[in-house]
Image (cartoon, rainbow, N blue to C red):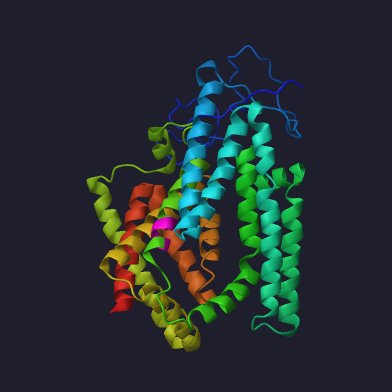
C-alpha cells in the first residue's frame, strides 16, 4: 500500500465544524493528531476511507496541499534539533546536570516520532529509537522491584509490590507491539487514529502509572537515606538543568521546527500574554493553593503526626541551603518546567484528571497523604490552565512554590 503523510490539523487552522467536540473559543480543543475525515483530501493522492477496525498500520492520511511538509524543511528542523539535543546532553553530562541530559534525550525521542508522523522517509529514524521507552521502562521496573526487596515492606506486601514491579516490566516490553500500543492510546487519549507521537506518549504515561505504587515504596526508602545527608538536597546547577530540560522536552513533544513555528508552538502550549483580567485569577489561585496546603497540613499533623513529620522533613530538605536567588530558581524550575510539560503539552491530550493523577504519581517522595494533596493542587492549577492559559498556571505554581519554600525555611 502506498504510504501517505498523516493528516494533522494545526491549532490555528480555521475550524471546519466536522468534529462534535470542536470549540473555536477554547484553545484546549487542540486535536493535532486527529484526521479530518469529513473533508476530501485536496492532494492528488487517493486515500482509502477508514474501516470500522481502524486503518492499516502503514496508512497515513494525506495532508492538504498548503500543509504538505517539504522534505528539506523537515531535514532543516532535524538538523537544528540534533544540534540542540547534542549541546544539551553534552553540557548536562559535563557539568553534572543529569536531569537536563535525560530530559533532552526524551525530547529526542519525540523529535523522531514527530518527523515520522509527517513523512514516511523518517520512519527508520523513529524505529531506531522506538524501543528506548519500552526497554528502559522494563529495566526501571526491575530496578524498582529489586529496591522494594530492600525497603521496609515485608511479607505479603513485599511479594505484591515486587510482583507488580515485574508485571510492569513485562507490560512495558509488550507495549512494543503495535496493536497493544494503539489500544493504550485509545484508552488514555481516545483519538480515532494513533500516531507515532501518541504511542510514545501513551507508553511513557502507562509506565508511570504502573510504577506509581511500587515506585513509591522504593523511592521513599532511597529518599530516606538521602535525607541523612547534611548537605543541601538541591543545587543551582540541578535546578537550572531541570528548567532547560523541561523546556526542550515540551518544545519537542509538540513538534517545534518540524510541524509548528515558534509562535504556533507557544499557542499549542498555551503560553500567552497574561492579561489584566488574569491577574485576579492568579491571585485567587495562589491563595487557593496556599489555603488548601495549609488546611491539609493541619489535618495531617492532627490525624497522622508521624506521616506529617516525614513529609515535613522532605520539605525541609528541599528548602535547606537555598538563598533567595536559589528559591526563585526553584520556583522557575518547578513552576515553569512542570507546568509547560504537564499542563501545557500533556493536559490538552490526556485531560485534567489523568494529568493530575500522573502529576501526583511523580511526587513519590511524599507520603500517600502528601500525594493526595499534590493531586488536589494539580486539579486546581489544571483548572486555571483550562480557564485561562498555561502562562497563568505557571505564575500561580511559581509564586506558590516560592512562598512555600520561604515559609518552610523560616
The reply to whether the magenta stretch includes residue 240 is yes
The residue closer to the viewer here, 275 or 94, is 94
Q: Check the picture and name the quadrant holding the C terminus.
A: bottom left
Say whether residue 101 is left or right of residue 159. Answer: left
Q: How many marks?
A: 0
**Residue 384 visible in the picture:** yes
Residue at 75% x, 81% y: name it: 156
Q: Check the picture and name the quadrant holding the N terminus.
A: top right
List x then y, in percent, for residue 37: 62, 25
The image quarter in which residue 196 lies:
top right
The image quarter in which residue 241 lies:
bottom left
Q: Write the start and end of the magenta stretch as one range.
A: 238-242
The residue closer to the viewer here, 359 or 352, is 359
Outermost residue, top side: 44
Residue at 51% x, 21% y: name it: 67
Say whether residue 126 is left or right of residue 23. Answer: right
User: Does 214 appear above or below 203?
Assistant: below
List x then y, in percent, for residue 7: 59, 27
Outermost residue, front side: 94
Residue at 73% x, 68% y: name it: 164
List x then y, in percent, for residue 99: 49, 58
Residue at 56% x, 22% y: name it: 71
> What main secondary structure does the magenta stretch of the protein show?
helix
The residue closer to the viewer here, 70 or 60, is 70
The residue closer to the viewer here, 281 or 12, is 12
Say whether residue 379 is left or right of residue 322. Answer: right
**Residue 69 visible in the picture:** no
The reply to whether the magenta stretch includes residue 2 is no
Say whether residue 119 is left or right of residue 2. Answer: left
List x then y, in percent, for residue 21: 52, 37
Amino acid at each position: 500500500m502506498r504510504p501517505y503523510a498523516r493528516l494533522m490539523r494545526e491549532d490555528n487552522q480555521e475550524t471546519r465544524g466536522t468534529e462534535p467536540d470542536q470549540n473555536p473559543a477554547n484553545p484546549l480543543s487542540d486535536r493535532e493528531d486527529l484526521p479530518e475525515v469529513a473533508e476530501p483530501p485536496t492532494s492528488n493522492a487517493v486515500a482509502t476511507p477508514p474501516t470500522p477496525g481502524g486503518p492499516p498500520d502503514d496508512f497515513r492520511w494525506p495532508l492538504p496541499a498548503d500543509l504538505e511538509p517539504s522534505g528539506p524543511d523537515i531535514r532543516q528542523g532535524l538538523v537544528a534539533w540534533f544540534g540542540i539535543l547534542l549541546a544539551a546532553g553534552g553540557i548536562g553530562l559535563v557539568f553534572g546536570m543529569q536531569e537536563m541530559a535525560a530530559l533532552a534525550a526524551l525530547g529526542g525521542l519525540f523529535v523522531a516520532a514527530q518527523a515520522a508522523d509527517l513523512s514516511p522517509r523518517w520512519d527508520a529514524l523513529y524505529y531506531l529509537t522506538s524501543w528506548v521507552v519500552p526497554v528502559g521502562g522494563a529495566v526501571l521496573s526491575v530496578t524498582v522491584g529489586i529496591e522494594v526487596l530492600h525497603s521496609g515492606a515485608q511479607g505479603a506486601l513485599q511479594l505484591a509490590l515486587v510482583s507488580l514491579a515485574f508485571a510492569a516490566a513485562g507490560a512495558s516490553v509488550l507495549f512494543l507491539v503495535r496493536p497493544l500500543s494503539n489500544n493504550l492510546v485509545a484508552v488514555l487519549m481516545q483519538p480515532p487514529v494513533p500516531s507515532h507521537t501518541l504511542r510514545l506518549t501513551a507508553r511513557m504515561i502507562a509506565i508511570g502509572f504502573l510504577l506509581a505504587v511500587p515506585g513509591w515504596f522504593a523511592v521513599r526508602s532511597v529518599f530516606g537515606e538521602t535525607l541523612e545527608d547534611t548537605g543541601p538536597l538541591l543545587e543551582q546547577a540541578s535546578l537550572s538543568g531541570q528548567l532547560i530540560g523541561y523546556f526542550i522536552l515540551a518544545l519537542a513533544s509538540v513538534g517545534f521546527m518540524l510541524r509548528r513555528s515558534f509562535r504556533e508552538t507557544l499557542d499549542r502550549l498555551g503560553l500567552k500574554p497574561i492579561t489584566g483580567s488574569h491577574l485576579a485569577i492568579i491571585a485567587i489561585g495562589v491563595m487557593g493553593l496556599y489555603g488548601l496546603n495549609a488546611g491539609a497540613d493541619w489535618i495531617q499533623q492532627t490525624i497522622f503526626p508521624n506521616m506529617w513529620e516525614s513529609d515535613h522533613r522532605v520539605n525541609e530538605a528541599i528548602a535547606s541551603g537555598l538563598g533567595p536567588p536559589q528559591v526563585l530558581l526553584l520556583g522557575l524550575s518547578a513552576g515553569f518546567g512542570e507546568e509547560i510539560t504537564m499542563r501545557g503539552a500533556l493536559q490538552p491530550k490526556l485531560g485534567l484528571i489523568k494529568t493530575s493523577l500522573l502529576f501526583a504519581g511523580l511526587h513519590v517522595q511524599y507520603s500517600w497523604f502528601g500525594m493526595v494533596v499534590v493531586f488536589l493542587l494539580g486539579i486546581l492549577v489544571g483548572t486555571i490552565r483550562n480557564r485561562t492559559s498555561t502562562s497563568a498556571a505557571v505564575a500561580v505554581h511559581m509564586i506558590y512554590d516560592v512562598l512555600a519554600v520561604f515559609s518552610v525555611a523560616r
